[in-house]
Amino acid sequence: MDAPVERRNFYGRIRGKTLRTSQKTYLAEDLDALTLQGVSRDENPERRTVDLSHFAGNPLWLEVGFGGGEHLVHMAARYPDIGLIGCEPFVNGIAMLLGKIRAEAVTNLKIHPGDVRDLFEVLPAGILQKAFLNYPDPWPKSRHHRRRFVTQGYLTGLARIMAPGAEFRIATDIPDYVRQALDEVPQAGFDLVAQGGTPWGDWLPTRYEQKALREGRVPHYLTWRRAG
């Protein structure tokens, strides 16, 4: 008999304001074809390794929580020989991404519209060459810091699927998020390479960063390497 699937809490938003008609069309017509199959627990309760043949053996990158999808599509267009997976449970953000994919006609990415921990369970160990965490939910209250991505419950899963030497980028405008990342990320097996106020050369400012700048908050950019 199969072992029972572990139950866990998920705290992020799933839905926001009412979708536009065009966004509903994107979800109805495009989402299934762009979804990476075999990731959800309902679809794959045995947690078998997911089929990555769509990427034809190309290097694989992951964006955790892609928001409106601008950075993910930018990277897919800039690096057509890279395979990208975007993970985001927020339906409104997924709909925004699907519209951008139509506009840019990129074909080298797939989506997991759910909890990134599901993806961590079914990707092969050491498969990722790069991962992005751009302006994650800050969970500002102290009692909610354990919900942040930069905790061992998320980071150990990410570390398992990243190759030795793979790059992990974090962008945030929250100083306490930087503090927690500097404390927790090394515990999961990553070495800090760089931190500061200068973005990466291929960086595309997201709408969250633009909002932070308008409101006077300072972006921080951190680069890590998977040890090993």
Image (spheres, helix red, strand yellow):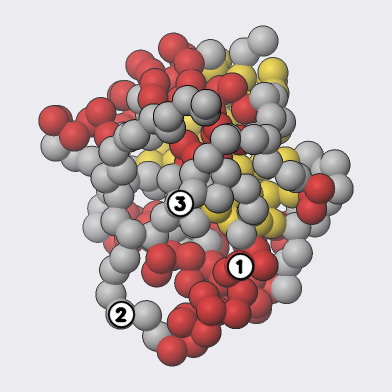
Residue found at the very far bottom of the displayed protein: 21
Q: Earlier in the sequence, mark 1 or mark 2?
A: 2
Is residue 185 depicted above or below 142 in this figure?
above
Residue depth check, mark 2 versus mark 3: number of the one nearer the observer:
3
Distance from Cα at disc 1 to Cα at disc 2 = 21 Å
Element class at badge 1: helix
Q: Is residue 129 above or below residue 81?
A: above
Amino acid bearing label 2 = Thr
Residue 102 visible in the picture: yes
Foreground tag (1 vs 2)? 1
Q: Residue furthest front?
A: 1
Q: Residue at x 48, y 65 (%)?
A: 94
Which residue is depicted at the point 64% across and 53% down? Answer: 37
Q: Residue at x 33, y 59 (%)?
A: 14
Q: Which residue is mark 3?
A: 114
The quadrant of the rendering that contains the C terminus is top right
Number of residues whose C-alpha sits closer than 10 Å to that of mark 2, classed few (under 14), some (14–19) or many (20 or more): few
Q: Closest to the observer: 75 or 110?
A: 110
* Front residue of 89 and 173: 89
Q: Position of residue 68 (x, y in %)?
A: 46, 64
The spot of residue 11 in percent (x, y) is 27, 45
- Is residue 175 visible in the rendered image? The answer is no
- What is the three-letter code of the residue carrying label 3? Gly
**Which structural element holds mark 3?**
loop
Q: Secondary structure at mark 2?
A: loop
Q: Which residue type does callout 1 highlight? A: Asp
Q: Which residue is mark 2?
A: 18
**Residue ID for mark 1:** 32
> What percent of the width, then of the height, locates residue 208?
38, 57
